Image: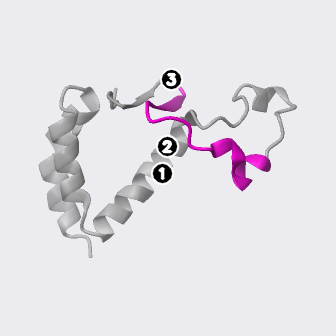
Amino acid sequence: MSYILGRQYVWVDATHLHIWSAEGYDGWDESSWAKGFEPPSDRRSAAFGLPGGVSLRQKVADEYVVMRMAELVANGELGPVMDRALANHGANSGCQALSQHASSLRTALAKVP
């Protein structure tokens, strides 16, 4: 399981990515985004609860990850981010997978225009 544990705790369960921060409340519930939501009224929506800024469905997080990776590649920042992840989070299986594939990722992504 990939996770980050420290002042920010980022982890997954069977269906969601959870993001907790010791640095506190960010005012999410006062944003125009949050004001556009009503409490869920059907059983399917109720299973996911109210918008709370604490978890994302894993498939949404995965989509964000690949979009963010494309931005990092385009900006030439992926290598330094990979280096930081390897230096700071080496004990978890997600980082071990990154370590195992880092060389191949660097080679493949170096060819991206």
- Residue at coordinates 53% horizontally, 30% vertically from top-left? 16
Check residue 111 for magenta coloring: no
In magenta segment, residue 22: yes
Location of residue 50 (image quadrant) = top right
Cβ–Cβ below 8 Å for labels 1 and 2? yes
Label 2 sits on a secondary structure element that is: helix
Residue bearing the label numbered 3? 14
Q: Does residue 15 appear left or right of residue 71 in this picture?
A: right
Q: Is residue 37 above or below residue 23?
A: below
Check disc 2 and give the amino acid type: Ala
Say which quarter of the image contains residue 29. Answer: top right
Badge 2 density bin: few <14, some 14–19, many ≥20, Cα 10 Å: some
Q: CA distance from mark 1 to mark 2?
A: 5 Å
Q: Position of residue 99 (x, y in %)?
A: 16, 39
Residue at mark 1: 64
The scheme the figure's colours follow is one colour
Evaluate if marks 1 and 3 touch, with contact meaning CB atoms under 8 Å apart. Answer: no
Mark 1 is surrounded, within 10 Å at the Cα level, by few (under 14), some (14 to 19) or many (20 or more) other residues, namely: few
Residue 10, percent across and down? 41, 32
Q: Position of residue 38 (x, y in %)?
A: 84, 40
Which amino acid lies under the numbered mark 1 shown in the image of this protein? Tyr
Q: Residue at x 50, y 30 (%)?
A: 18
- Residue extent of the magenta highlight: 14-36
Q: Residue furthest right?
A: 41
Residue that numbered label 2 is attached to:
61
Q: CA distance from mark 1 to mark 3?
A: 18 Å
